[in-house]
Amino acid sequence: MGMAFLSSSLSDLDVRARHVFKTIVETYLDTGSPVGSRTLSQMEHTGHTLSPATIRNTMADLAALGLLSSTHISAGRMPTHAGLRLFVDGLLEIGDLSTPERKAIKAQLAGNAQDRSVESVLENASNALAGLAGGAGIVLAPEQSGALRHVEFVGLDASQALVVLVYEDGHVENRIMALPQGLMPATLEQAGNFLSARLKGKHLSEARADILKEIETGRAALDAASAALVKQGIAEWAGSEKNVQNRNLIVRGRAQLLDNAGVQSDLERIRLLFEDLERKEELIALLDKAEDADGVKIFIGAENPLFSLSGSSVVVAPYRDTDQKIIGAVGVIGPTRLNYARVIPMVDYTAAMVGRLLQTGQ
């Protein structure tokens, strides 16, 4: 059943059907168990006095729309992944975080006043989300391709050089480059000095076009061999800037998922989720999708191939650098019965705080 049909079906539901559907989903998210018609009819907070038979008929209509499912005929109903999506998009009432909750998140992110490093802030964010949201906290760190401080070529043998890239934040990358035969040591030194002067304080992506233009127009005081080496290096490094291996993925709170498992079927899903979490490249690709959105993005169960088996949900939001460029993402991953009303504003606020801490250090 296509999402377009389901998204239009909310307006097709009458007041009673919408009310029953909302109550079933809220009860399921609260308890994790399928909801029966008798249970619904006994719930005073529904505000409607409906007989179990009337509720059963309404539930059957909702199941026919693909919004509810049941494990077997006598069991209660629970929302499908499509039903959860409809609920989150159209019926979920998202409250704002309280002032104490905001203070608690901010305090956890700040952590040790002596250690405000990027790594520390991101570790704290992952731990905070896991502790507060009842799922696993996930953080995608910025790409290791920030502003550079120094570039150096070190000859290994006649055919290879080690390229040392020193970044302004202190991290160092070493890369192996193939060299043309007969390259002189002076060429390596000249190319390193040339690049260091032009890349200092800049991202490679920012300076790349200017460097190539300087070489092409003959303004670069480089011999042919050094110019060729610089062009080769820039081409190779630019190609690897989006390399998944350069991304650091922090996952904390796996134990939270086990603590919150209610039944054996939950444990099996969480075992599958642990396997999903090991598939780093696919998870990073999923989090990268957060860069398409300004705010919180929600992936529910089978909507994403990565979680089609474990039936997990991801609530994720991007964070930004001083130039307001998206550089990473924070989020929560857990069973589809996450407390969305609480988790969504929590992830949103945490992403904003991470961005602020990384930009200002306070």
Image (tube, rainbow, N blue to C red):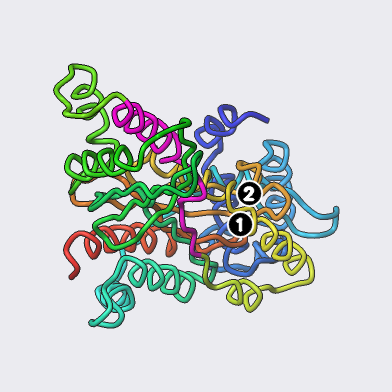
Residue at the top extreme of this rendering? 217
Q: Is residue 207 above or below residue 248?
A: above
Tell me the SS state at disc 1. loop
Determine the CA span between mark 2 and mark 1: 6 Å
**CB under 8 Å between discs 2 and 1:** yes
Q: Residue at x 73, y 65 (%)?
A: 271
346 relative position to 33: left or right: left
Q: Is residue 277 above or below residue 205?
A: below
Residue 245 belongs to the span the image colors magenta: yes
Q: Nearer the viewer, residue 135 or 339?
A: 135
Q: Residue at x 54, y 39 (%)?
A: 14
Q: Is residue 276 above or below residue 211?
A: below
Q: Which residue is mark 2?
A: 301
93 relative position to 130: left or right: left
N-terminal of the two: label 2 or label 1? 2
Residue 18 visible? The answer is yes
Amino acid type shown at disc 1: Thr
Amino acid type shown at disc 2: Gly
Q: Residue at x 53, y 37 (%)?
A: 10
Q: Which residue is mark 1?
A: 336
Residue at the right extreme of this rendering? 73
Could you tell me what secondary structure mostly forms the magenta stretch?
helix
Magenta segment boundaries in residue numbering: 225-250
Residue at the left extreme of this rendering? 219
Pinpoint residue 246: horizontal percent, then vertical percent.
Answer: 46, 51
Residue 54 belongs to the span the image colors magenta: no
Question: Neighbour class for label 1 at 10 Å: few (<14), some, many (≥20)?
Answer: many
